[in-house]
Image (tube, rainbow, N blue to C red):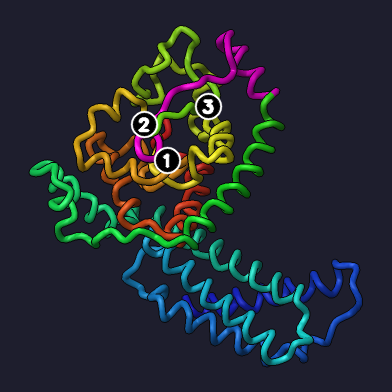
């Protein structure tokens, strides 16, 4: 794998240098030989960073959630080195080259792993999140014998509340994604509205009360995917053949497009991009004490439950995935979930 990453780094730099030299309308920069020491140092630092966080461990499964967390940590450490090296050795390195180099090499590294993981999954059908699922299975076992939070935490990592930096950065990420998501929603709204009304005359958007942070009730927005006569607070479909789902709604739910209006909830601050799914009030009212732990963080559009199986996971295990996120909440975990959400949107599984 490290040989592939050397190619990734060299390819990323070549792309960055070529774009700066030939595509951007800026004065010419130093010749390629001027960057030789920078390239060598970057390659060594890249391999070292990934080795340090165990990314090259052959026992680990590519693009599992825990792998992605360490992958992102490795990229962060490498990026810090690249910036430090470029600014404290030769200040006349092109900033555009350095920035594009980091972005392109990071993208190539992820794409290469996504391709390898896809080929491996097709050949072996291996599930990459065994470690996390074993932890969650222990949560399920403990929750069945006791509702006490201390029992649930037994044998698990004790929850540590993230600091102010995490929450500020998370909010900035939420705002950026919300603005982008709402732009797509506005652009697609006329087309989506046409197909929804064509299948089942009525409202395009529906509003539901949901339970958010600390049990606070708020209004969530979704594209309507069921027939107009379906009660607003019916249980969600358990399979794609549910007769309540419209033809347009089936496509919207499959690719999670029905949830795009929730970026407005994210912008308002009721929700986050990453977090437990907001639950209906009548469901939250039945929570045991340990289940209420999931209400101690903002609900999200995507989360651990969505990327680790969605509705293919038995109902009794859904909450445990959310509580796993609560116990292990971090910026790297959020970014890993976002990265892992992308292939789940493109190749949906368990979305009804």
Locate residue 27, reporting x and y percent. 91, 76
Residue 170 seen by the camera: yes
Occupied quadrant, residue 300: top left
Farthest residue, direction left = 145
Left or right? Give the position of 151 relative to 330: left
Q: Are marks 2 and 1 in contact (CB under 8 Å)?
A: yes
Left or right? Give the position of 89 relative to 28: left
Magenta stretch bounds: 190-215
Locate residue 274, reporting x and y percent. 46, 47
Locate residue 189, reporting x and y percent. 67, 26
Q: Is residue 206 magenta?
A: yes
User: Mark 3 falls on what kind of element?
Assistant: strand
Pointer 1 residue: 299
Nearest the viewer among 131 and 6 is: 131
Image point (49%, 44%), residue name = 272
Please report whichever mark, 2 or 1, sits nearer to the chain's N-terminal start.
2
Q: Residues within 10 Å of mark 3 (few under 14, many from 20)?
A: some
State the CA–CA distance, disc 1 to disc 3: 14 Å
Image point (50%, 59%), residue name = 114
Please report whichever mark, 2 or 3, sits nearer to the chain's N-terminal start.
3
Pointer 2 residue: 279
Q: Are marks 2 and 3 in contact (CB under 8 Å)?
A: no
Query: On residue 221, which mark appears?
Result: 3
Left or right? Give the position of 123 relative to 340: left
Left or right? Give the position of 115 relative to 349: right
User: Mark 1 falls on what kind of element?
Assistant: loop
Nearest the viewer among 30 and 243 is: 30
Query: On residue 130, which mark appears?
Result: none
């Amino acid at each position: 794998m490290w040989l592939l990453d050397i190619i990734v780094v060299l390819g990323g730099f070549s792309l960055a240098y070529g774009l700066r030299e030939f595509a951007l309308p800026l004065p010419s920069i130093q010749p390629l030989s001027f960057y030789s020491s920078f390239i060598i140092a970057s390659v060594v630092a890249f391999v070292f960073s990934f080795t340090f966080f165990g990314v090259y461990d052959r026992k680990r499964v590519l693009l599992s959630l825990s792998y992605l967390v360490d992958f992102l940590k490795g990229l962060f450490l490498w990026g810090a080195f690249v910036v430090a090296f470029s600014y404290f050795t030769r200040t006349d390195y092109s900033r555009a080259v350095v920035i594009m180099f980091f972005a392109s090499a990071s993208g190539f590294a992820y794409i290469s792993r996504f391709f390898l993981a896809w080929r491996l999954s097709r050949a072996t059908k291996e599930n990459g999140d065994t470690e996390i699922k074993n932890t969650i299975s222990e949560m399920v076992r403990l929750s069945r014998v006791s509702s006490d939070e201390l029992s649930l935490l037994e044998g698990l990592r004790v929850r540590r509340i993230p600091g102010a930096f995490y929450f500020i950065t998370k909010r900035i990420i939420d705002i950026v994604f919300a603005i982008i998501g709402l732009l797509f929603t506005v652009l697609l709204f006329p087309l989506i509205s046409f197909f929804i009304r064509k299948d089942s005359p009525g409202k395009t958007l529906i509003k539901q009360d949901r339970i958010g942070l600390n049990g606070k009730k708020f209004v969530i927005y979704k594209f309507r995917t069921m027939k107009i006569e379906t009660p607003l607070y019916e249980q969600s479909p358990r399979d794609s053949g549910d007769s309540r789902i419209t033809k347009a709604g089936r496509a919207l739910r499959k690719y999670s497009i029905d949830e795009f209006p929730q970026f407005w909830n994210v912008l308002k601050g009721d929700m986050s991009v990453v977090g437990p799914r907001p639950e209906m009030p009548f469901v939250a009212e039945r929570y045991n004490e340990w289940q209420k732990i999931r209400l101690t963080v903002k609900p999200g559009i995507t989360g651990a439950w969505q990327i680790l199986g969605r509705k293919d996971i038995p109902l009794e295990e859904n909450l445990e995935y959310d509580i796993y996120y609560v116990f292990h909440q971090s910026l790297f975990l959020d970014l890993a979930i976002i990265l892992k959400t992308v292939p789940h949107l493109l190749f949906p599984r368990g979305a009804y």
